Image (spheres, rainbow, N blue to C red):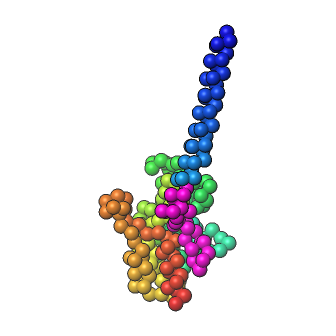
Amino acid sequence: MNTSVANTGRTLWAALRMLLVLTVVTGIIYPLVVTGIGQALFNDKANGSMVKVDGKEIGSRLIGQSWNIKGTDKPDPKWFQGRPSNSGYDPLTTGSSQLGASDPTLVKNVRAAKKQVAQFNGVPESEVPKDAVTGSASAIDPEISPAYADIQVKRVAEANGLTAAQVQKLVDDHTEGRSLGFMGEPHVNVLELNIALKELAEK
């Protein structure tokens, strides 16, 4: 009986020591090492890919944001607009609408959005690309297709007192190709494009 108790005690003590060692290694040392490597080699990405203007953080390259007229839910014609967001670009409530492609509600919403986007940008509905009327899975997609950027050029140029050629060049300069040349689709980061637009408009 005493031997059994002693063996149990030794087993429990060994298990406790292992728990303490693993807690220190995986709960303290490993996170500190990984954080240190991230800060040293990938500082910008490790800190959220924040974008700064005049030393002030104005957003993240990875998270979309609304470009509405201040104090309203109406899109501001001066800015390039991003994809529709089911969460209002709130990173704390990400997620899609969960409506299937054949859902009558989704079909109705897409048709209404297509009409609205076409009127807002002064183009035929046939020119409105899919990403202009459908949200992403995360609801905070920071990028749009070059096609969606292109249909906004005329409206943005007029609202900022610029020529369409000037604004189109901004779009072309900020269009990124497929990752590694074959993954994904060409895209334009809306935040970075609008920053460049603001700089051009203020010259």
Q: Residue at x 40, y 77 (%)?
A: 173
Q: Which residue is more in the foreground, 25 or 39? A: 25
Residue 179 located left or right of residue 193: left
Q: Residue at x 61, y 40 (%)?
A: 23
Residue 180 horizontal/vertical position (percent): 33, 61
The answer to whether 46 is drawn above or below residue 8 in the figure is: below
Residue 72 horizontal/vertical position (percent): 65, 71
Residue 92 horizontal/vertical position (percent): 62, 55
Quick check: is 61 in the magenta stretch?
A: yes
Kindly give the residue lying farthest to the bottom in the view shown.
203
Q: Residue at x 53, y 81 (%)?
A: 198
The answer to whether 63 is drawn above or below residue 31 in the figure is: below
- Range of the magenta residues? 35-63
Note whether residue 190 is visible: yes
Q: Which residue is more in the foreground, 196 or 115? A: 196
Kindly give the residue lying farthest to the top in the view shown.
1
Q: How many tags in the picture?
A: 0
The answer to whether 1 is drawn above or below residue 164 in the figure is: above
Residue 13 horizontal/vertical position (percent): 64, 27
Q: Residue at x 57, y 43 (%)?
A: 25
Residue 125 located left or right of residue 33: left
Kindly give the residue lying farthest to the left in the view shown.
182
Note whether residue 115 is visible: no
Location of residue 21 by image quarter: top right
Q: Which residue is more in the foreground, 143 or 73? A: 143
Quick check: is 88 in the magenta stretch?
A: no
Q: Give the quarter of the figure containing the N terminus.
A: top right
